[in-house]
C-alpha cells in the first residue's frame, strides 16, 4: 500500500513538471543554443591543460629575419612530445618584450576550442 502512495506522488510531480515545460513557448534547438550563448552569466571556457616545464636550450636563428627559439622540456609529457620549440619573443603584462633564458621554469597551457557535433 505504501508503495502505491509513493508512485502517485511521483506521478503528480512528473505531471506538474510536464505542465511547466509545456507552458513555455516552443523554441527550436538552434534558438535555445543561441540564447545560452548570449547569457552573460554563463561564460563558456575552452578545455585546457597546464603543465610545468623548463627551458632546456636556446636555439639561435639561422637567418637575420628569423627569431631565435626556446626549447622547452615539458614535465609529465610522453617521450615523443616532451620537447617544444617556440619563438623566443614574448611580451610581459606591461607590453615589454622579454626573452626566456636557459633553465627558466615555465608553465605551458594547451587550450582547445570546444567543437559541438551538429550531426546528432
Image (spheres, helix red, strand yellow):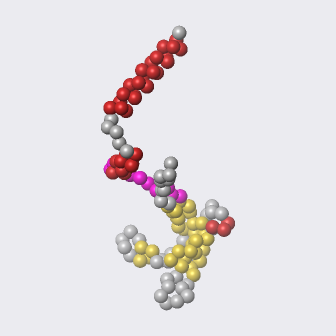
Name the dominant secondary structure of the magenta segment.
loop
> In the depicted view, which residue is nearer to us: 32 or 95?
32
The image shows residue 105 at horizontal and vertical percentages of 54, 68
Q: Could you say where residue 18 lies in the image, as x and y percent from the top left?
A: 40, 29
Depth check: 61 or 37 in front? 37
**Res 54 visible:** yes
Q: Position of residue 112 (x, y in %)?
A: 50, 60
One can see residue 103 in this view? no
Q: Residue at x 46, y 17 (%)?
A: 8
Task: Please tell me which residue is depicted at 54% across the width and 79% down the height of the picture.
Answer: 69
43 drawn magenta? yes
Q: Residue at x 57, y 66 (%)?
A: 53
| Name of the residue lying farthest toward the top | 1
The spot of residue 60 in percent (x, y) is 55, 84
Which of 75 and 12 lies nearest the eye of the viewer? 12
* Residue most extreme to the right: 79
Q: How many marks?
A: 0
Residue 73 falls left or right of residue 23:
right
- Residue 116 is inside the magenta segment: no
- Nearest the eye: 23 or 36: 23
Q: Is residue 70 above or below residue 109?
A: below
Q: Identify which residue is drawn at 56% across, 74% down.
A: 85
Image vertical order of residue 21 relative to residue 63, above or below: above
Specify start and end residues of the magenta stretch as a single range: 39-49
Amino acid at each position: 500500500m505504501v508503495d502505491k502512495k509513493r508512485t502517485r506522488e511521483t506521478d503528480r510531480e512528473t505531471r506538474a513538471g510536464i505542465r511547466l515545460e509545456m507552458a513555455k513557448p516552443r523554441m527550436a534547438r538552434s534558438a535555445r543554443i543561441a540564447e545560452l550563448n548570449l547569457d552573460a552569466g554563463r561564460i563558456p571556457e575552452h578545455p585546457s591543460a597546464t603543465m610545468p616545464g623548463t627551458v632546456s636550450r636556446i636555439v639561435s636563428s639561422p637567418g637575420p629575419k628569423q627569431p631565435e627559439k626556446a626549447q622547452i622540456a615539458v614535465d609529465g609529457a610522453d617521450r615523443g612530445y616532451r620537447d617544444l620549440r617556440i619563438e623566443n619573443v614574448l611580451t610581459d603584462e606591461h607590453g615589454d618584450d622579454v626573452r626566456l633564458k636557459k633553465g627558466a621554469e615555465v608553465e605551458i597551457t594547451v587550450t582547445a576550442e570546444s567543437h559541438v557535433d551538429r550531426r546528432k
